[in-house]
Image: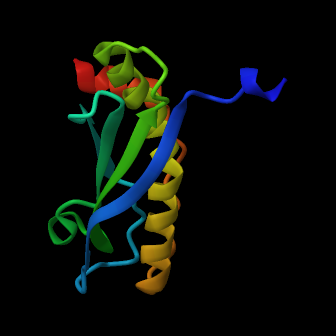
């Protein structure tokens, strides 16, 4: 009974590729700011046809001093995914799966890392908003 709801796709692991955090000592905290960030999603099917990689890179508060932001943060995070050996899937379908489901799987990890880094850096913990992955993919595709 449970076999019909278990996915043939697997989330194997993730790794934080890099974190770059810089505090802006000249920040004027009397100014109200909105969260300023961008996201890039890169997807690749690996040499093994059943394995793929999704990398999400975000830049939060780019050019902190020039824009009077409290800090600048760049994070790159990669997730590794696979499909069951017995599943026949085209490379294009696997890439589509990675774009949507891979990115959706990684976003909670990214959001958690941002909170942890900002909290540990003794700045106001930053909680990124929820993301609409469909819109991100549509925007990047244009």
Please say if 93 is above or below 134.
Answer: above
For residue 77, say whether it is visible: yes
Farthest front residue in view: 86
Please say if 81 is above or below 28.
Answer: above
Question: Total marks drawn?
Answer: 0
Residue 48 versus residue 46: which sits nearer the camera?
Answer: 48
Name which residue lies at 31% across and 78% down.
Answer: 28
Residue 75: x %, y % from top left: 30, 61
Quadrant of the drawing holding the C terminus:
top left
The part of the image, by quadrant, that contains residue 22 is bottom left
Residue 105: x %, y % from top left: 51, 42
Quadrant of the drawing holding the N terminus:
top right
Residue 91 versus residue 71: which sits nearer the camera?
Answer: 91
Name which residue lies at 32% across and 36% down.
Answer: 52
Residue 116 versus residue 5: which sits nearer the camera?
Answer: 5
Q: How has the structure been colored for display?
A: rainbow
Residue 47: x %, y % from top left: 20, 34
Residue 16 versus residue 74: which sits nearer the camera?
Answer: 16
Name which residue lies at 51% across and 38% down.
Answer: 10
Please say if 110 is above or below 27.
Answer: above
Residue 131: x %, y % from top left: 49, 39
Please say if 13 is above or below 91.
Answer: below
For residue 34, say whether it is visible: no
Name which residue lies at 41% across and 56% down.
Answer: 14
Q: Classify residue 16 as left or right of residue 103.
A: left
């Amino acid at each position: 009974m449970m076999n019909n709801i278990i996915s043939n796709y697997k989330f194997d692991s993730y790794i934080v590729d890099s974190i770059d955090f810089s505090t802006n000592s000249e920040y004027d905290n009397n100014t109200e700011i909105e969260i300023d960030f961008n996201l890039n999603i890169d997807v690749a099917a690996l040499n093994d046809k059943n394995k793929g990689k999704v990398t999400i890179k975000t830049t939060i508060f780019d050019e902190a001093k020039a824009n009077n932001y409290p800090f600048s943060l760049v994070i790159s995070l990669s997730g590794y995914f696979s499909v069951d050996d017995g599943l026949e899937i085209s490379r294009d379908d696997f890439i589509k799966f990675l774009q949507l489901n891979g990115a959706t799987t990684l976003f909670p990890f990214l959001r958690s890392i941002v909170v942890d880094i900002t909290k540990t850096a003794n700045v106001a913990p930053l909680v990124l908003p929820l993301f609409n992955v469909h819109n991100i993919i549509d925007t990047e595709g244009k």
